[in-house]
Structure formats: structure tokens, C-alpha cells
Image (spheres, rainbow, N blue to C red):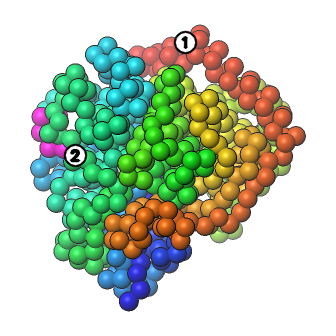
């Protein structure tokens, strides 16, 4: 009997289920989309039950495409979007829509955290700057604005523990990497912080149980077997947050290697043996999926989703042409972007379409184009978006270096890694060699690595990564373009700071809410 592993990546806009062999090769996969909803300005929600239903559909299709006996799939690991949570009752039923990590409604609660705990003390405990991304401020929002839901809540469950529970885990088990992004975990002790819970007057009993990644937490139940196609009794292994899983799936499990994911969101992640704190509190320090280790990262709220916005709003001709040709619209957009000169003819995009996370942590920030003229094409806007997202990533990398993080190698993953032109834009803006993974879905691969560890198919993370993670291409930087991009990068930073200093974004947001 052969051994296979399933990695399930439950992301912001869809779920990808992949069946891997023990060398990290894909033998079957399936994808299902699900939408976000936007009830008010700054609010982002999801239907948690739809996430589960789409996951079940994708698992059945992936197993069928793999053509393997479900009993040969030894274990299942989950990579899940972080911070997005659903209040559930004791039966596991949602009490309201899930609130997304992209949701920025809770800026008043963030101010309250600052008053009750203090930004510096909060960062010292959690490794996180105070911000709307983390779950805690939105849990506080529910307690304040929807007290009846707060009281009925059995657990505030992220997708990791909620889907594991539906698959058959007897309880709600949240891995340390996801737990650290709830905003209530002591980053050194890997435990919920009683100090924070008491200060914010929250109920510890409503939080999941914390466990390390790679731990067996249950088995596929008879009910979920019928829904998913997995064999009853298949091991369920605690996975991790999508970006920490991507770190493993990209081989960022040693010092000096950083992983850049540009998917719906963007995350730049570096492995650490010990927690490195950022004195400016611009970058978080979180738990890695390598159990007992840490990572520092920079989160971008709208990375690939910025280009998706462009596709949906400006590239309708490309969507129609792609449908007729049977190709991906992004292939046509990439061809057009390649024809635009570096710097997008003097056009800069500040890509804060879902506010700003790292490194500026500005809940009021919004997407901005600077330098737009009557001579610019929409294709120049597309390139400016790619460059703007990469400038944002460059600012994160520079802050990591300032904090003492070694940056010797960069590995690219996420949907943007499918774009050769965007890969070269990244190499040119960073001024460093960038490697491309054989498996684009590093998140699902990382979850599969953790599942293999839980099933004891490999002895440790390093052994599993050596077998399952492969590099297939390398992009070298053009140093002349790098010098040009350095000048644009300085203008990019200055433009944002000028708008922030004048309170332009904050005034706009508050005016829109009137």
C-alpha cells in the first residue's frame, strides 16, 4: 500500500484540496471559490457554512482525480486563513457570519486595548502591534454591539479548529501559529494570556484549546467520511495558519531564508530560533508551525486581491477574450504588463485597498494612485499595482533587516508566483535572487508536511522538507532596474507618509461613515 497525504488550504476566497505523494508531488487537486460580503464600509464577512460545504465538494473531487484508495491517504492537515473566526454554539452551528481578518470595523476597540493594556505591553505579551487584523478586537466588538451572540457563543472558532471539529476532532483545537494571531496568546509561553483576558474582560472558556502544529487531534468520523470521501478513521493533524504553513511549504525552516507569499493577502515570513522583537512594533513576532519556534512576518491586507480588483473592474475585455480562448485572464494581463516600462510611466499605486497592516498599521489607509495622467492606460495601472504591492513587501523586508533578521535567500509562493513578469518585478525591486517553488500552493504543501509528521511518516520537519519541497526556477535581479526602482520606492514611502500626516485617509473614512 502506498502512502499519500492531504493538505487542505482554506483561504480567504476559496479552498484548495491537494493529495500529495511522499515526495511532495501533486496526484490530485480541486478548488472551490466562496465569496466575502461587505455589509458596510470596512466590514468583511463570510458564510462559515458555505466554507464547509465547499471544502467537502473539493475533497471529493480531489480524491476522485487522484484515483487513489482513500484508505491510502494516511493523514490530513489544514492550512487556514488566520484571524477570521465564527462564533459557534455547543452544536458547532454558527451564531453569525464569520468576521474576516480583512475587516477593520474595530478601530475603537483597538483604541480601548491601547488604553486598558498599553501598546508596548500588548506587543511584549503577544508579539503583535495593536491592530484590527487580529481576532481579539472583533471579539470585543461582538461583546459590545451583539451581546446576545457573545453570551450564546461556545467558542470563537477560526477555520482551523472549526473545520477539524466538523471532520471529526472531539473538541476545538487551535494550533499555536493560529492562536498567536488571535491576539490573546502569550508568545513565549504558547498559552492564553490571563493578563490580557482579564484586562479586556473576556471569557477564557470561549477560546479554543491550544496545541502545537503536527499533533493528531482526531480521526475522520463516519459522518464526515460520507461528506468528504475521506476514509473513516483517517488521522486529523493540527495544521497551521496559512502563512506559517507556506513557510514550511517554501522551506523557510532555517535562518536566512525568507518566504514571500502574494495570494489574496501578502505575507513575508522569516524563521527564528528565538523571538526577535521589533522595537518600533512595526512587525509581529508569531508562533511558527515548526513547533516551539517563532517567525516574524509582515502582513499585507490586499496583495493579490488588489490585482483581482483590477481584473474585475477594468479587465472585462480580457475576461471575455480569455473565456473564448480557454485561458486564464491573468495570462493576458501579464502579457500587457510586460509591455509597460518599469515604473509604469511615472504611476505609483499605494495598494492599501483593505487598509494597511505591516509595516504602517493604519486602519484608515486606502488604495491610492499617484501620478495618473490622461496618457496612462489601464494596463499601466495593472503594472503599478504589481509594483505597489512589491514596494509594500520591500518595506517589510527592509524592516526585518533593521531588526536583525538575516535575508540571504527569498522564495516566492502564492498565486502571483504563476506570473513570470511579477516574479521578475519582485527580484528587481528587492535586488535579490528569487526562487520559485515546484508546487505553487506552498500553504497546502506545508499542511501536508505537518500531516506527514503527525502520522510519523517523517522524523522531523527538516527531513520532510528535504523530501517534499522542490525549487524549479530562479529569477535574478536586473541591477539597473533595481536602481530605478529604488527611486520610485522612496517616492512611494514619502507619498504615503504625507497623506497620513495630513489625516487624509482618516478624514475620508469617517466622512464615508456619516
Locate the C terminus by quadrant: top left
Where is residue 236? Give x, y as percent.
Answer: 28, 66
Secondary structure at numbered mark 2: loop
Q: Choose between 306 and 41: the one closer to the eye.
A: 306
Along the line of sight, the residue nearer the viewer: 315 or 23? 23
Which residue lies most toward the right here?
480
Residue at far top of view:
502
The foreground one among 292 and 205 is 292
| Quadrant of residue 170 within the rendered picture | bottom left
Using residue 378 as the reference point, say whether residue 178 is left or right of it: left
Where residue 384 appears, x then y in whole percent?
Answer: 72, 38
Q: Is residue 97 visible?
A: no
> Quick one: quadrant of the N terminus?
bottom left
Badge 2 crowding class, 10 Å Cα cut-off, few under 14, some 14 to 19, many 20 or more, is: many
Q: How many marks?
A: 2
Name which quarter of the figure residue 5 lies in.
Answer: bottom left
Asked if labels 2 and 1 touch by Cβ distance under 8 angstroms, the answer is no
Which image quarter: residue 232?
bottom left
* Left or right: 138 as drawn, with respect to 353: left
Residue at left offset 65%, top offset 49%: 410
Disc 2 marks which residue? 208
Q: Earlier in the sequence, mark 1 or mark 2?
A: 2
| Badge nearest the viewer, 1 or 2 | 2
Judge left or right: residue 45 versus residue 294.
left
Could you say where residue 90 lies in the image, as x and y percent from the top left? Answer: 11, 50
Asked if residue 380 is positioned above or below residue 174 in the image, the reply reads above
- Residue at x 30%, y 39% (from the top left corner): 189
- Which residue is the site of mark 1? 503
Q: Which residues are magenta?
A: 150-155
| Residue 259 locus on image (x, y percent) | 58, 49
Amino acid at each position: 500500500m502506498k502512502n499519500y497525504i492531504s493538505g487542505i488550504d482554506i483561504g480567504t476566497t476559496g479552498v484548495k484540496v491537494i493529495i500529495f505523494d511522499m515526495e511532495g508531488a501533486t496526484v490530485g487537486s480541486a478548488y472551490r471559490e466562496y465569496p466575502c460580503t461587505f455589509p458596510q464600509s470596512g466590514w468583511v464577512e463570510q458564510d462559515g457554512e458555505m466554507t464547509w460545504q465547499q471544502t467537502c465538494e473539493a475533497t471529493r473531487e480531489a480524491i476522485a482525480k487522484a484515483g487513489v484508495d482513500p484508505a491510502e491517504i494516511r493523514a490530513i492537515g489544514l492550512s487556514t486563513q488566520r484571524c477570521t473566526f465564527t462564533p459557534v454554539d455547543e452544536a458547532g452551528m454558527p451564531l453569525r457570519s464569520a468576521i474576516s481578518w480583512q475587516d477593520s470595523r474595530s478601530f475603537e476597540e483597538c483604541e480601548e486595548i491601547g488604553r486598558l493594556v498599553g501598546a508596548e505591553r500588548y506587543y511584549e505579551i503577544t508579539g503583535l502591534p495593536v491592530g484590527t487584523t487580529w481576532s481579539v478586537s472583533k471579539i470585543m466588538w461582538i461583546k459590545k454591539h451583539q451581546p446576545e451572540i457573545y453570551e450564546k457563543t461556545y467558542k470563537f472558532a477560526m477555520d482551523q479548529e472549526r473545520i477539524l471539529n466538523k471532520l471529526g476532532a472531539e473538541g476545538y483545537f487551535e494550533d499555536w501559529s493560529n492562536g498567536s494571531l488571535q491576539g490573546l496568546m502569550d508568545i513565549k509561553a504558547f498559552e492564553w494570556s490571563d493578563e490580557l483576558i482579564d484586562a479586556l474582560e473576556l471569557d477564557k472558556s470561549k477560546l479554543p484549546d491550544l496545541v502545537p502544529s503536527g499533533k493528531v487531534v482526531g480521526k475522520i468520523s463516519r459522518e464526515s467520511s460520507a461528506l468528504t470521501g475521506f476514509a473513516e478513521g483517517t488521522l486529523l493533524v493540527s495544521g497551521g495558519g496559512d502563512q506559517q504553513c507556506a513557510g514550511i511549504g517554501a522551506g523557510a525552516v532555517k535562518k536566512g531564508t525568507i518566504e514571500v507569499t502574494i495570494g489574496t493577502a501578502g505575507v513575508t515570513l522569516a524563521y527564528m530560533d528565538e523571538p526577535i522583537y521589533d522595537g518600533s512594533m512595526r512587525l509581529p513576532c508569531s508562533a511558527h508551525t515548526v513547533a516551539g519556534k517563532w517567525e516574524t512576518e509582515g502582513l499585507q491586507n490586499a496583495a493579490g486581491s488588489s490585482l483581482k480588483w483590477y481584473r474585475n473592474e477594468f479587465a472585462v475585455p480580457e475576461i471575455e477574450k480569455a473565456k473564448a480562448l480557454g485561458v486564464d485572464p491573468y495570462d493576458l494581463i501579464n502579457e500587457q504588463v510586460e509591455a509597460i516600462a518599469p515604473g509604469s510611466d511615472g504611476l505609483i499605486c499605494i495598494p492599501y485597498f483593505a487598509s494597511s497592516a505591516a509595516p504602517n498599521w493604519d486602519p484608515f489607509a486606502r488604495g491610492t494612485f499617484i501620478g495618473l495622467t490622461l496618457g496612462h492606460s489601464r494596463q499601466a495601472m495593472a503594472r503599478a499595482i504589481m509594483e505597489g504591492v512589491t514596494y509594500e513587501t520591500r518595506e517589510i523586508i527592509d524592516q526585518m533587516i533593521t531588526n536583525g533578521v538575516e535575508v540571504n535567500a527569498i522564495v516566492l509562493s502564492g498565486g502571483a508566483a504563476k506570473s513570470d513578469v511579477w516574479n521578475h518585478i519582485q527580484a528587481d525591486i528587492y535586488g535579490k535572487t528569487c526562487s520559485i517553488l515546484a508546487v505553487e500552493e506552498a500553504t497546502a504543501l506545508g499542511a501536508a508536511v505537518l500531516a506527514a509528521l503527525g502520522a510519523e511518516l517523517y522524523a522531523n520537519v527538516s527531513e520532510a522538507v528535504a523530501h517534499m519541497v522542490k525549487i524549479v526556477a530562479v529569477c535574478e535581479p536586473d541591477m539597473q532596474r533595481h536602481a530605478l526602482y529604488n527611486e520610485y520606492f522612496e517616492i512611494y514611502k514619502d507619498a504615503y507618509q504625507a497623506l497620513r500626516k495630513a489625516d487624509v485617509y482618516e478624514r475620508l473614512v469617517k466622512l464615508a461613515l456619516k
